[in-house]
Amino acid sequence: MEAGKNNVGYALECPNCGKNARLVEHLQEIPHFGKAIITTLACEKCSYKLNDVMIANAKDPVLYKAEVSEKKDLEAKVIRSSTGTIRIDRLGISIEPGPAAEGYITNIEGILDRVESATKALISSPGTDEADESKLARKELERIKKARNGEVPFTVIIEDPFGNSAMLGAKAKKMKLGPEETKRLQAQLEGLDSGKEEEKDIELPPMPEGAEAEE
């Protein structure tokens, strides 16, 4: 498939309802990244939709790391494939692979936006009636706000055992993912494919009561 050519489509079974769905692949030239394969799986019967993106010419296990200490650092570009893990340890954020995990093209600020939206959804969901749980989620929103404003420096780490993810920015560093970590992540993905793991995407680990963002 060549960049600029028409989309390529395939008929597949919908993972949600089992009816016929359509998978469309599109090769696109992404500025500064090169060619990327963008896929969309859509089912007209149940409206299920899943997007993914992967770098077309990079398949070695990779680890990207970027320090964020000021607002302009949030502009670093990110391609996150469904096989990629994003961690922001200081904020207690982990975005992991899973059957429903989506790939996307964004920047670091966009990652914070996604986590912020997930946290707000958690607060408003019927199952979040506990005062302590709601309080912790609201603290997480405050931490994200401070991070967005440059008040809390943090490090973004992207790991992808199949090299499908990438990050580009003045402070972004590309490193080789170690063999042990590569095997661990690949085994995790294989477990997800075989149904041995639960569905995962954005995780917000609970913070200890009274915990505040580090200065």
Image: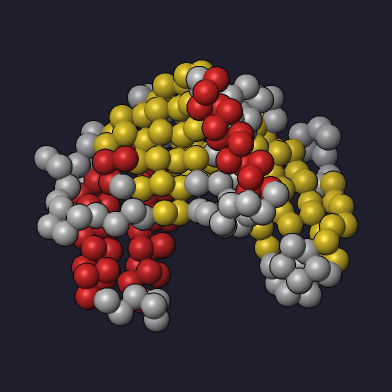
Which residue is found at the position 66% from the left and 25% from the top? 59
Which of the pair 131/144 is nearer the observer?
131
Q: Residue 8: where, in percent of width, then height?
A: 85, 46
User: Is residue 147 at all visible to an observer of this figure?
Assistant: yes
All told, the count of numbered labels is: 0
Residue at the far front: name it. 196
Which of the pair 153/62 is nearer the observer?
62
Q: How is the image coloured?
A: secondary structure
Quadrant of residue 30 in the image? Answer: top right
Quadrant of residue 73 in the image? Answer: top left
The vertical placement of 122 against 200, above or below, is below
The vertical placement of 121 against 203, above or below, is below
Which quadrant is home to the C terminus? top left
Quadrant of residue 1 in the image? Answer: top right
Q: Residue 195: where, in percent of width, then height?
A: 66, 54
Going by the image, does 51 lie left or right of 23? left
Q: Residue 50: where, in percent of width, then height?
A: 66, 58
Which residue is found at the position 47% from the left and 21% from the top? 174
User: Is residue 160 at all visible to an observer of this figure?
Assistant: no
Q: Residue 175: where, in percent of width, then height?
A: 47, 19
Which residue is found at the position 71% from the left and 54% from the top? 40
Going by the image, does 33 lie left or right of 19? left
Going by the image, does 3 lie left or right of 127? right
